[in-house]
Image: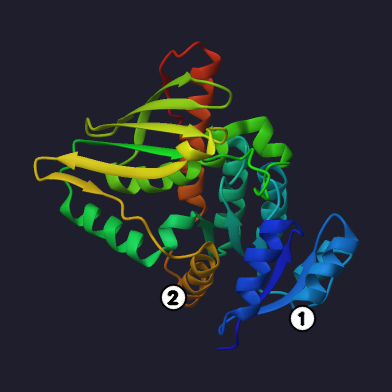
Amino acid sequence: MAAPRFGLLGTGYWAGRTHAAAIAAHPDAELAGVWGRDPAKAAAVAERHGSRAFADLDALLDAVDAVSVAVPPDVQAELAVRAARAGRHLLLDKPLALSLDGARRVTDAAAASGVASLVFFTARFFPDVAAWLDGVRRAGDWHGGHGAWLAALDQPSSPYRDSAWRRAHGGLWDVGPHALGMVLPALGPVERVTAAGGLRDTVHLALRHRGGGSSTLSLSLTVPPAAATIAFEVYGPAGRSAMPRSGATALAAFGEAIGQLGRAVATGTPHPCDVRFGRDVVAVLDAAQRSLADGGRTATVAG
């Protein structure tokens, strides 16, 4: 089977340094074109990675088998629907959308067209973390868990410090999906959420899972650099089990995601991180946002 032809939608730092670089380097993929809202930036990304810039999105969709989308989440939802309706497989970033309605529209479009999909939750594609999570799921009988995804976006060296959507929506919507990408498969679907705000964008979540388990998460983009961390562990009758600290890179993880999407296309088997899982994550974020707006009152996760 010929290597799938990918069209990259997006021209920012993450699009160029991760999406484009990983696709161009992958032995089983081809970067067939780049499209962006800024044609000059699209041309620069395409030239850097030996590809072609497209000024017209429909022309790019006609030339590819799949799209790799690296734009703000609200823009991503609209582009993903358009690509799915054109019959193109979807390699998307988290969060799937900034609203539950947007996430549902992507899911419905993918289902209607029968395309394969994968939402990139970075740690899920680190081999050591993926192996740990598989072990956690096989063991089962976990009573709960707790985690912290705390970042320091204000560092001068951060490539995301001027990201408008991250500044507007904070840690809940940026690092929250990473946390939930681990919590949901480890402990099961979330039914209810209670959220409390902290300093700046910091938010703390208490999650009630189907079956009675519970978990807590602390999320932020604006902690002091010395406080930045990523940690998650589960506990139960067998004791505690902590997510390993991976030495893998985001670039390598994205390459793994490309390969896994290709296998989903070839076999017709849905990926565990497909758009339906992405929608479920957005449903929890939506409930958390409603809880925050309602003064910390517990919110039910929409079905």
Whole-percent x, y for residue 44 in the image: 84, 68
Q: What residue type is labelled 2?
A: Thr
The residue to which callout 1 is attached is 50
Determine the image quadrant of residue 31. Answer: bottom right
Q: Earlier in the sequence, mark 1 or mark 2?
A: 1
Q: What residue type is labelled 1?
A: Gly
Res 87 visible: no
Disc 1 crowd rating (10 Å Cα; few below 14, some 14-19, many 20+) is few
Residue at horizontal 35 percent and vertical 38 percent from the top: 147
Res 156 visible: yes
Quadrant containing the N terminus is bottom right
Q: Residue 238 carries which label?
A: none
Residue at horizontal 48 percent and vertical 19 percent from the top: 291
Determine the image quadrant of residue 83. Answer: bottom right
Q: Nearer the viewer, residue 110 or 235?
A: 235
What colour scheme was applied to this rendering of the protein? rainbow
Whole-percent x, y for residue 89 in the image: 60, 66
Whole-percent x, y for residue 2 in the image: 60, 88
Residue at horizontal 57 percent and vertical 45 percent from the top: 95
Q: Is residue 115 left or right of residue 37?
A: left
The residue to which callout 2 is attached is 267
Q: In this view, does 128 lie to the left or right of 295?
A: left
